[in-house]
């Protein structure tokens, strides 16, 4: 159970990081255009 909770938090963190990177990429893209 502990590993499941840990993996869940790890995945959530990764998803947040990915979303952050994606948003910054979109911002730079719109600035370039």
Image (tube, rainbow, N blue to C red):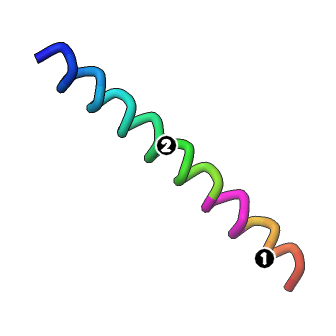
The residue lying toward the viewer, choosing from 1 and 15, is: 1
Between the residue at mark 1 and the residue at mark 2, the CA separation in whole angstroms equals 21 Å
> Which of the two marks, 1 or 2, is nearer to us in this view?
2
Query: Quick one: 1 or 33, which is closer to the camera?
Result: 1
Residue 16's label in the rendered image is 2
Q: Position of residue 6 (x, y in %)?
A: 29, 21
- Expressed as whole percent of the image width and height from the top left, the position of residue 7 reads 29, 30
Quadrant in the rendering for residue 13: top left
- Residue drawn at x 53%, y 53% is 19
Q: Secondary structure at mark 2?
A: helix
Coordinates of residue 26 in the picture (x, y in percent): 69, 69
Q: Can you say which quadrant of the picture contains the C terminus? A: bottom right
In this picture, is 13 found above or below 3? below
Between residues 30 and 4, which one lies in front from this camera angle? Answer: 4
Asked which secondary structure carries label 1, the reply is: helix
Q: Magenta residues?
A: 22-26
Name which residue lies at 37% across and 37% down: 12
Q: Residues within 10 Å of mark 2 (few under 14, many from 20)?
A: few
Q: Residue at x 18, y 26 (%)?
A: 4
Q: Which mark is residue 30?
A: 1
């Amino acid at each position: 159970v502990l590993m499941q909770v840990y993996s869940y938090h790890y995945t959530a963190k990764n998803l947040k990081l990915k979303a952050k990177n994606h948003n910054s990429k979109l911002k730079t893209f719109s600035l370039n255009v």
